[in-house]
Amino acid sequence: MIQSLLIANRGEIARRIIRTARRLGIRTIAVHSDVDAGMPFVREADEAVCIGTAAATDSYLRQDRLLQAARTTGAEAIHPGYGFLSENAEFAESVIAAGLVWVGAPPAAIRAMGLKDAAKERMIAAGVPVTPGYLGADQSPERLQAEADAIGYPVLIKAVAGGGGKGMRKVDAAADFAEMLESCKREAAASFGNTQVLIEKYILSPRHIEVQVFGDTHGQAVHLFERDCSLQRRHQKVIEEAPAPGMDDATRAAVCEAAVKAARAVDYVGAGTIEFIADGSDGLRADRIWFMEMNTRLQVEHPVTEAITGQDLVEWQLRVASGEPLPKRQDELSITGWAMEARLYAENPSTGFLPSTGPLDRLRFPDGVRIDSGVEQGGEVTPYYDPMIAKLIVHGATRGEAAAKLASAARGTQVWPVRTNAAFLARAAAHPDFVAGRVDTGFIERHVDALIPAAEPSPAVLAAAAAAILPAVTGDPWTSLRGFRTNAAPSSQVAVEVAGKPYLVTGDQASAAVVADGVLFLDGEAWPFGPRRADHIAGAGEGDGAILAPMPGRVIAVLVEAGQAVTKGQRMLVLEAMKMEQALLAPFDGVVAELKVTEGAQVSEGTMLARIDKLVPSNGESE
């Protein structure tokens, strides 16, 4: 068994590898950028080495520094995790050439599966079914158009070196093909440095089915069954589950056998995933499931496979890399129950999924849920890396039980002041179509209005806020926040502020909300609240002139001064978060009464940045 392991990655996957390595008695070495020095994975490793600055190109993608760190710490092996250099054949070769153990796929297999067209040709030769399409070397627009016409619309143009949804265009009609081809090639050139494309038949009710495979150096290859990753947004997975809903035994046997064939075709060693596209319009059928691509690494969603099989896939990786045979034969593997995983992201669905960064003053998860996370309470979500905060992983005896557990876990998640998609995940997991297994890759787009929480607090949130402050309300009728009349009994109305806006609500209702440090957590959402301020008693609201930060971020431009006259729509400040800029505009003509930030300031969502007073007409009367 390997005795020392350098982890060429960060965050959640680094912590995941450290947990298994520690159980196996393996010494671990973390590498980190300067901004990651305080991260949990650095503290949890036996040793840590700083390899550069925040930019991944100056740290986690620096092959020379990773190898140097391995040499100076006496590491015996390197585990690349996923992302970064995990599917880089050149890096794998460099690790092996340095006399180190590479805990990943063989470089030849990485190369064989790296280009979609070459991979499909190899799969055809191996007898693995592939999506109808064109993989030819003739890349002239005329030939590509002719092939698309012959396949029949809609078709999908895909960059052969693509991934992550980039370099991909759906074409619905022949008249649109030339324009979409040019657009696809431009993106492919910018993202991958390769303009080659292939054409595929577009599946109208697509489901994303993938099979976990494993090979060893003794010529063995097995599968650990399938996962369904159909619930996606912009080609990025949101909720994954295992097994796939609606998969019967015969179809499972066919697709899993095809996956093992694919692995054997490239002499695969280690953990890999064979991805298939399925036409789910008439249920899952073996003759409507086709090879799409292979991921030559461990997947983000591997925990759901671990949950239904009872196997530790990182342990399998380390044992196989150490030269041991696979821990289990195919006939020793079976499915128990159902598992689901949801990706908790630092983003705000109600503002178009704007990224959210900043401190994690509160980060709490409910009991009874597996949480794989790279951060912890008191830490920070920075703009430099992936915005995933955690993976919520549940297991149940049935799919219905697993879905209910996942929805409950998302509802019980508490994060502040960073915004998350927890409420979005809860709504998705509880949606009737999801619970019934009616899921394909268009699920979120079809149901987006029902899945995205409203930007304004719900009646339940307002009632919970009022109930939370009601015990502190004084009995003095002149200062009380409760409604009062001299000729009637006191009402239970309470004047509150939620997310900076005033409301008058009833506060006698019981609530399941959690309250901590002036923030109310309910159903996966977080709302700052408190008694209504005196300056809001008159009914200030959207028109009060307060300019609030719509997301946590850094003020990169202050374009006005205190006392300056501004016109409606005038740019006042510019915020930046995760390389996304947002200009904040004057809501009406007026004068800048307050300016509370300077350029370079880091602010939380909801922070008041400035305030505008309306101009008063010359006759002295208010408008």
Image (cartoon, rainbow, N blue to C red):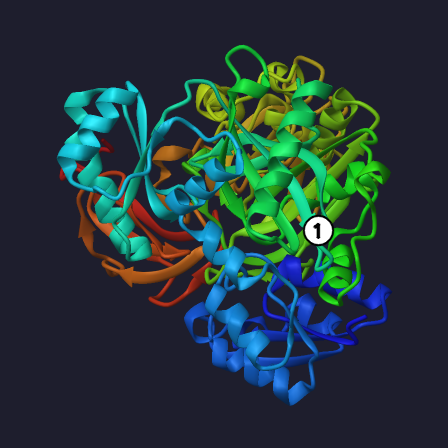
Q: Amino acid at mark 1?
A: Asp
Mark 1, secondary structure of its residue? strand
**Residue 324, percent from left and from top:** 79, 62
> Would you say 161 lies left or right of 248 here?
left
Foreground of the two, 137 or 231 = 137
> Would you say 529 lies left or right of 606 here?
right
Q: Quadrant of the C terminus?
A: top left
Q: Quadrant of residue 474?
A: top right
Q: Quadrant of the N terminus?
A: bottom right
Q: Quadrant of residue 12?
A: bottom right
Q: Quadrant of residue 574?
A: bottom left
Q: Residues within 10 Å of mark 1 (few under 14, many from 20)?
A: some
At x 66%, y 52%, the residue is 271
- Which residue was labeled with disc 1? 372
**Residue 298, percent from left and from top:** 63, 52
- Whether residue 482 is visible here, answered yes or no, is yes
- 390 up-or-down from 146: above or below: below
Foreground of the two, 516 or 297 = 297
Foreground of the two, 509 or 168 = 168
At x 70%, y 79%, the residue is 76
Foreground of the two, 445 or 228 = 228
**Residue 373, percent from left and from top:** 67, 54
